[in-house]
Structures are given as structure tokens and as C-alpha cells.
Image: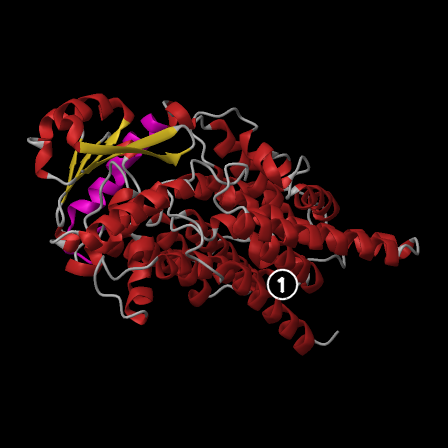
Amino acid sequence: MSARAIGGLFLLIAAGAAAIRLGDLDRRPMHHDEANQAIKFGALLEKGEYRYDPEDHHGPGLYYLTVPAAWLGSERSLADLTERTLRSVPALSGVLTILLFWLLRDGVGVRSLLWAAILAALSPTMVYYGRFYIQETLLMCLAIGAIGAGWRYAQRPGTGWAAATGVFAGAAAATKETWIVVLAAAAVALLLARLGCPGRKGGHDPGPAGSAAGKPAAAHFAAAATCFLAVFSLLFSSFLENPRGLWDSLAAFGGYARRAADAGAHTHPWHYYLQVLAAPGGRLGPVGSETLVLLLAVVGGAAGFAERRLIRFLAWYTLLSAAAFSAIPYKTPWNLLPFHAGAVLLAGYGAESSIRAAARRRLTIAAATLMGAGVVFLGVQSCRASYTLAADPGNPYAYAQTSTDFMKLVGRIRGLASRHPDGKRMPVFVCSDPGETWPLPWYLRDFARVGYWRHAADAGNLRNAPVVIASLDQEERVSEALGDEYLYELYSLREGVFLALFIQD
């Protein structure tokens, strides 16, 4: 296959990845984490201001990258924003991740890279969480960018690739606090890869292999460090308008360390991520969607460990980052994306190695058939997870997902506002713990008179509002204050969490 044909096929795969990620982005109700990020971005969009909050919200990278998307959609305020615009940013980050694989083409082989691109394009985990307005897909993309630029530098040392590595790493550091885990894993993996077995004479490490093992020139290191610090500092300081943001970005590690140790409902056993990938269960079936990827990753790591320096690095990186994330008690399923990208690259090499091994035994057709069936299975599972069962409680990827019943609550409030004399200026009182309020602020973002209180007693005279929403722990107090003049309805916010709606009769 010619280089032009391979390049064209690679772009075709990326286009397919875009199609599966960008379709019907508003199909699933906003997750409470997405809504939280969206409201934070709305303040940046409307006022042009951003202040890093070390207690929550993560880094500024996602917010600043969303600004161009909002401008392109002619959205200038929080009320204008749509789910499609917000979710297009992580979705395109997922596509860019695949395109950045190309930087590694001579390290894993172009055919292996094509397999990796196919597996990434159809990965149910990458597709489902790549349609979430949260930081993890962007972090994965930037991590792959840093690894890819670093590999290009290793093959041909120069200021350009050194600077690009620093830019990608700095942007990753300004995206989410878990970048430190990814960076540490990559640094140790690089050391172990260099200490490992060298490639065979005439082996599969193309380019000036010796350059990857030597110390980078001081000027190149300075360029990478300068770019890292420049990107990191500009983003966290809100482009120098908030210098305190730099200190807050460091102070945040203490808070996140405490949260990681005391994870509450997000505490999961060490094998949680493996379970999500290999045996998620639920309505997708007992056989995990990513089992094929994991098996091929093991094959790829074993087949190329001694022969290819990059495979050796990817194997260590994937293993170390997966182990680090698994050791942290606090776990949410999307945190697996940075190390899963490494597994997908290894799986691409594993797929090509398996086909080559089968060809030597004249089993090419059988191997191709099995691989094709596995790819089709991935595609079917991705479509079921992200479209058919996007918000279904039986979808194992739908972690604390907002219920479709909640959208009936939103529709009910909007219907009441359409008949109220004040329209969207109709007063709405919400008495609930913040954890049981989101994503309501997103869905009522265009209502002018919505008040939020943790306790009903703090809301004053509840009868000043024709509509009152209460969590179940506040329901009795609200009911007593309103008496018999309000209708009562109950809606599911998410599995096990309900909101009571009181409507003035």
C-alpha cells in the first residue's frame, strides 16, 4: 500500500471517528459534572473573566478552548449555549487524539497505527466519555500530543519538537490536576524504556535511535521548559489578570489529595477500571466492550517490547499510569482515558502482529475475519452505549447519569413559565443540597428569578414562588410551609435521587 493510500485511509478513519462522536450531541441529558463545567464556562463567555477555583472545576484549559466553539456558533451568553456546542469540544479532542497518533507512525509501524486508529475510533469508552463536557478527553488528547511530539524529538532532535512537547505538556497541566499522575508515569516509563533491551540489529526502531537515548541539548530542554511554563502560567493566571491562580494551582493538590483519600460514594476497589473495560455488565452484555482491546494490548506489548523502543515506553506508561490511577480510592470511569489511549496504541501493534503471525501459518483469512468481527462488535457497542442507551440506567458507562425523567421536570417548569404572566421571570425556589441540584442550574440558565438554598428555612416565605423544588430531605419542611395550596409531583434526578416539585394551585 502506497504512502498516499495509507494517509488517505488514516484520514478516512478519523472522519469516521468524527461522525460517531458528533452525531446527536444533545441526545443525552446533561450530567451534573457537565452542567457544573458549563456554568463555569458561561461566566468566562459572558464576562471574559476566569478565576481558577482550587476547590473544584479543575483547570482552565477546557474553558478557554470552548470559547472559539461558542463564537463559531454565535453564542455569546450562557443562555445562548447549547449542549451541541459544549460537547463538540471534547468530541473533536477525541478525533484529534487519533490524528496525533500519526506522530508515532515510525515507532509502531503504519499498519499498526491504522489498527490503533480504528480501535480508538470505535472504542465504546472513548466514544461515550468523548461526548461529555468534562476534562478527561482533552487531557488524553494533550497527553498523546506530548508523547507524540516527544517521540518526534527523539528521532530528530530540534527546538521545534522540544517546544511542541512543552506546549502539549503545559496545556495538559492546565486541564486537570491528574496531569501529575500522567506526567510521573510517562517520566518513569521513559527511564525504564531506556534501561530496557535495545532493539535488535536491523530491528524495528527506525530513524536515529541513538538520539532518543542521549541527553537532550540544554537549549532544547530550555525551550520545552519555557513553553511548558508559559502555557501553564498564562492559562492559570487568566492571561496575567489573576496571578494568584498560579499559587492556587499548586495549593489545589492538597485538596485533591484529601478528596482522593476520602472518596465517599466514588470509592471503588483497585480493579474498578479493569472491570469497566473488560466486564462492565449491564444492558451491553456480560462480555465487556473493550475486552478485545485489552487482549490485543497484551499481545502488542509482549510482541514489541524487546524490538521497539516506543512499544516498550507505551507498555510501561500504560501499566504505570493504570496502576497509579487504580491505587487511588477515588475513581470515576472517565479517569481511565489517559492510560486507555496507551492500551489502544499497544492493541494496534498487537492486531498487526497477530495478523502477521497468522499469515505465517496460512491463517490470514481466519485472523482477518476474527479481527473484523471484533471491530464490528466495538462499533455496535459504541452506538448502543452512546445513542440507544445513552442515559439508560442499564448502561454501565452511564455513571451517576441524569435521568430522562428529570427532563420531564424541566419540561414541566418551562410549560408553567409559558403560561405564567412573568414568563421566564417566574420565581422558582430550589431547596436542596447542591449535590442534588445539578444539572438544574444549567437547564434553568435562561430563567431570571431562580433562587437556591440548602435549607428551606433559609428561603424566607416560600409562598412567594409559584414553583418550589425540594430534595427529599427538605420535602417535609417545604410541604409544611406551603400547606394544601400547592400540587405535589415527584421526579427522578438520577438513580436513587429524587426531587419534589410543588406547584401553586
* Residue 450 visible from this viewpoint: yes
Q: Is residue 33 visible?
A: no
In the picture, measured across the screen, residue 115 lies left or right of residue 316, that is: right
- Whether residue 72 is in magenta: the answer is no
Q: Is residue 95 above or below residue 310?
A: below
Q: Which quadrant, please, contains the N terminus?
A: bottom right
Residue matched to label 1:
105
Q: Amino acid at mark 1?
A: Arg
Q: Nearer the viewer, residue 319 or 289?
A: 289
State left or right for residue 321 relative to residue 415: right
Q: Quadrant of residue 463?
A: top left
| Colouring | secondary structure
- Label 1, secondary structure: give it: helix
Residue 447 left/right relative to 9: left
Q: Residue at x 49, y 38 (%)?
A: 333
Q: Position of residue 83 (x, y in %)?
A: 36, 56
How many C-alpha atoms fall within 10 Å of the one at disc 1: few (<14), some, or many (≥20)? some
Q: Which residues are magenta?
A: 236-259
| Quadrant assignment for the C terminus | top left
Q: Quadrant of residue 473?
A: top left
Look at 59% across and 53% down and name the residue there: 383
Residue 87 at what x, y percent from top left?
A: 40, 56
Q: Which is nearer the eye, 277 or 380?
A: 380
Foreground residue among 59 and 263: 263
